[in-house]
Amino acid sequence: MPPLDPEQDIWFKQNLLPYGDQLAAWLRRKYPNVRDVEDIVQDCFLKTIVANGKRPINSPKSYLFTAARNQAINHSKRMETRGENVLARIEEFDVLDSETDVVEDVAHKQELEILEEAIKSLPARCREIFELRKVHGLSQQEIAERLGLSVFTVYHQLSIAFDKCACFVERYEREGRQ
């Protein structure tokens, strides 16, 4: 998706961006089992912008929160159906923990290798933004400033990165079962 035109950028900054932190806090409180709340927020920003481009939204805040609620519910259902996703558990990995057994260590190492391959398969810009967010812990705003991009572009690129990584992992798991 190309960068926002100036009107879309202004609309985003006025009608959605001010609610980002509030939306993230609400999601954490209302859906404590959902991980990667920031990713849900950015996906909802993107969906709301796209929807507004097709037909003007009268209440952007309501639309944004409704989209987030729906996405959090869907995320929870997916997690229940297929178990925890490798991407969602990455912060739990402690491969050097001496109290875990060898089988767990090997499994964790394999999961990390799969995730590393998924990240390597990303387009260069997506990979750079993903690493700045997930490895270096920069916020979307900090990444946008550092790379000279709009916040929307960072959100969009992160969304692409997460989708591509999830597809890579799912494809790997599906091929491994056959």
Image (cartoon, grey):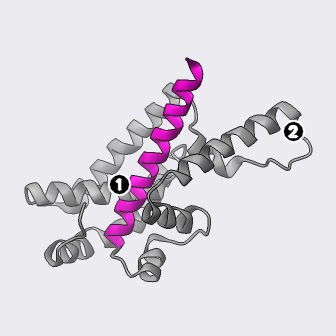
Q: Secondary structure at mark 2?
A: loop
Residue 26 visible in the shown view: no
- The answer to which of 84 and 143 lies nearer the viewer is 143
Q: Quadrant of residue 136?
A: bottom right
| Residue at left offset 62%, top offset 64% | 135
The image position of residue 28, as x and y in percent, is: 50, 53
Answer left or right for 52 relative to 102: left
10 Å neighbourhood of mark 1: few (<14), some, or many (≥20)?
many
The image position of residue 98, as x and y in percent, is: 92, 45
| Residue at left offset 86%, top offset 48% | 97
**Magenta span:** 151-178
Q: Earlier in the sequence, mark 1 or mark 2?
A: 1
Q: Main secondary structure of the magenta part?
A: helix
Which residue is situated farthest in the top direction here? 178
Residue identified by numbered label 1: 43
- The answer to which of 158 and 58 lies nearer the viewer is 158
Q: Where is the C terminus found, in terms of image quarters?
A: top right
| Residue at left offset 57%, top offset 45% | 87
Residue identified by numbered label 2: 100
Answer left or right for 109 relative to 35: right
Amino acid beneath label 2: Thr
- The answer to which of 7 and 77 lies nearer the viewer is 7
| Residue at left offset 73%, top offset 47% | 93
The image position of residue 36, as x and y in percent, is: 51, 52
Q: Where is the N terminus found, in terms of image quarters?
A: bottom left
Answer left or right for 10 relative to 24: left
